[in-house]
């Protein structure tokens, strides 16, 4: 996926409008060979933007019935900072089971993986892939691509904010050379111990640089900080 990811990032960086962004995201869906891909964002003023590949009739019913209030995926992402595999959620309630039955009939897919994203000024977004796969194939897919999907989700969110910038604008502070070094190591796929060893610093010191960079970039976590640093051209791969 690395070559495809690099191509996706290049095309994403050149997106200037939300239509451009939609085209790039839907192209990514085809590249990673999943049936559905969804990016949905709600900013602090309640404005929403979404790119999705579900059947329009299902989207219309979802909105009309306000299924978000009972959808275990949405509720699960609101309560978590880490990616959510749909199979690990609680679908035991009657309303949840009925909702799941409708979703399956609408072709949403029996497997799903959602990344919750918390942006500046109260913005919340979700990046989701779903498909009709066996448990074995899905486990292999998520095991292989989880890191890339998390990174892609933050790239997409950053670009959406950049295009819509105004209500969710954040002021970017310059990173120090050492903060750039640390984020570069992490962007290359090194874990914190490996990055610290490569830079001849302690993990404690590395964490301090990460937290400082995260604060300057207005990022809610390390992955988002890395994505923003790359998107702003502060880290080059």
Image (cartoon, helix red, strand yellow):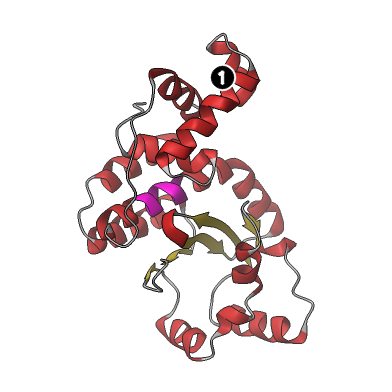
The outermost residue toward the right is: 92
Region rendered in magenta: 152-158
Residue ID at (33%, 57%) = 160
Whether 187 is among the magenta residues is no
Residue lying at 56% horizontally and 79% vertically, measured from the top left:
68
Q: Is residue 105 visible?
A: no
Label 1 belongs to which residue?
195
- Tell me if residue 155 is in the magenta stretch: yes
Task: Tell me: 132 left or right of 47.
Answer: right
Instruction: Note whether 20 is above or below 64 in the view shown.
Output: above
State whether residue 224 is above or below residue 35.
above
Q: Position of residue 132 (x, y in %)?
A: 59, 66
Q: Is residue 200 above or below residue 79?
A: above
Rendered residue at 76%/86% (across/down): 94
User: In which quarter of the view is residue 171 placed?
Assistant: top left
Is residue 197 shown to the viewer in this render? yes
The residue lying toward the viewer, choosing from 66 and 62, is 66
Magenta span main SS: helix
Q: State which quadrant residue 194 falls in.
A: top right
* Secondary element at tag 1: helix
Q: Residue at x 71, y 86 (%)?
A: 95
Q: Position of residue 58 (x, y in %)?
A: 48, 84
């Amino acid at each position: 996926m690395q070559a495809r990811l690099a191509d996706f990032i290049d095309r994403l960086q050149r997106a200037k409008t939300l239509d451009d962004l939609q085209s790039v995201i839907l192209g990514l869906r085809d590249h990673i060979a999943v049936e559905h891909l969804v990016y949905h964002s709600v900013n602090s003023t309640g404005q929403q933007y979404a790119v999705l590949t579900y059947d329009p009739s299902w989207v219309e019913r979802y909105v009309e019935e306000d299924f978000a209030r009972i959808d275990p995926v949405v509720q699960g992402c609101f309560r978590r900072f880490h990616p959510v595999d749909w199979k690990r959620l609680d679908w035991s309630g009657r309303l949840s089971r009925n909702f799941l039955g409708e979703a399956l009939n609408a072709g949403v897919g029996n497997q799903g993986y959602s990344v919750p994203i918390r942006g500046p000024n109260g913005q919340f977004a979700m990046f989701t892939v779903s498909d009709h796969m066996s448990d074995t194939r899905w486990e292999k897919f998520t095991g292989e691509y989880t890191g890339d999907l998390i990174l892609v989700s933050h790239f997409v969110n950053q670009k959406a904010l950049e295009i819509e910038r105004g209500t969710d604008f954040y002021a970017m502070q310059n990173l120090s050379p050492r903060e750039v070094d640390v984020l570069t190591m992490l962007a290359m796929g090194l874990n914190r111990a490996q990055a610290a060893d490569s830079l001849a610093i302690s993990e404690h010191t590395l964490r301090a640089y990460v937290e400082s960079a995260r604060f300057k970039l207005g990022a809610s976590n390390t992955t988002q900080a890395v994505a923003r640093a790359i998107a702003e051209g502060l880290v080059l791969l």
